[in-house]
Image (cartoon, rainbow, N blue to C red):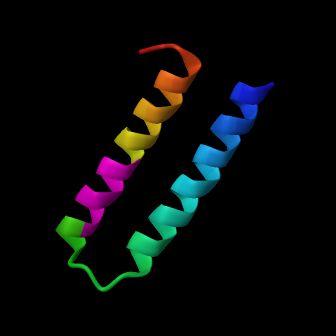
């Protein structure tokens, strides 16, 4: 149950971070690179908390 809460909180924070990056005045190629890095970090965090990595 606690893993589910951690995953839910991580996904909500990821969504907020992606929204903030999308709304920032950063050029498009850099913008999608930052979003990709944020998604990879979120996947790594969720995987390490769940015991996959």
In this view, which residue lies farthest toward the right? 1
| Quadrant of residue 34 within the rendered picture | bottom left
List x then y, in percent, for residue 39: 40, 46
| Quadrant of residue 16 within the rendered picture | bottom right
Q: Which residues are magenta?
A: 31-38
User: What residue do we see at 36% from left, 82% from top?
Assistant: 24
Q: Is residue 3 left or right of residue 23?
A: right
List x then y, in percent, for residue 36: 32, 50
List x then y, in percent, for residue 17: 48, 63
Q: Main secondary structure of the magenta part?
A: helix
Q: Quadrant of the N terminus?
A: top right
Q: Is residue 31 left or right of residue 14?
A: left
Q: Is residue 5 above or below residue 26?
A: above
Q: Is residue 29 above or below residue 6?
A: below
Q: Is residue 44 above or below residue 51?
A: below
Q: Quadrant of the C terminus?
A: top left
| Quadrant of residue 49 within the rendered picture | top right
**Residue 37 counted in the magenta span:** yes
In this view, which residue lies farthest toward the bottom? 25
Count of number-bearing discs: 0
User: What residue do we see at 45% from left, 41% from top?
Assistant: 42
User: What residue do we see at 27% from left, 68% from top?
Assistant: 31
């Amino acid at each position: 149950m606690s893993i589910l809460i951690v995953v839910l909180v991580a996904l909500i924070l990821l969504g907020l971070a992606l929204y903030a990056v999308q709304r920032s005045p950063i050029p498009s190629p850099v913008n999608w690179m930052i979003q990709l890095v944020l998604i990879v970090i979120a996947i790594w965090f969720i995987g390490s908390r769940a015991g996959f990595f």
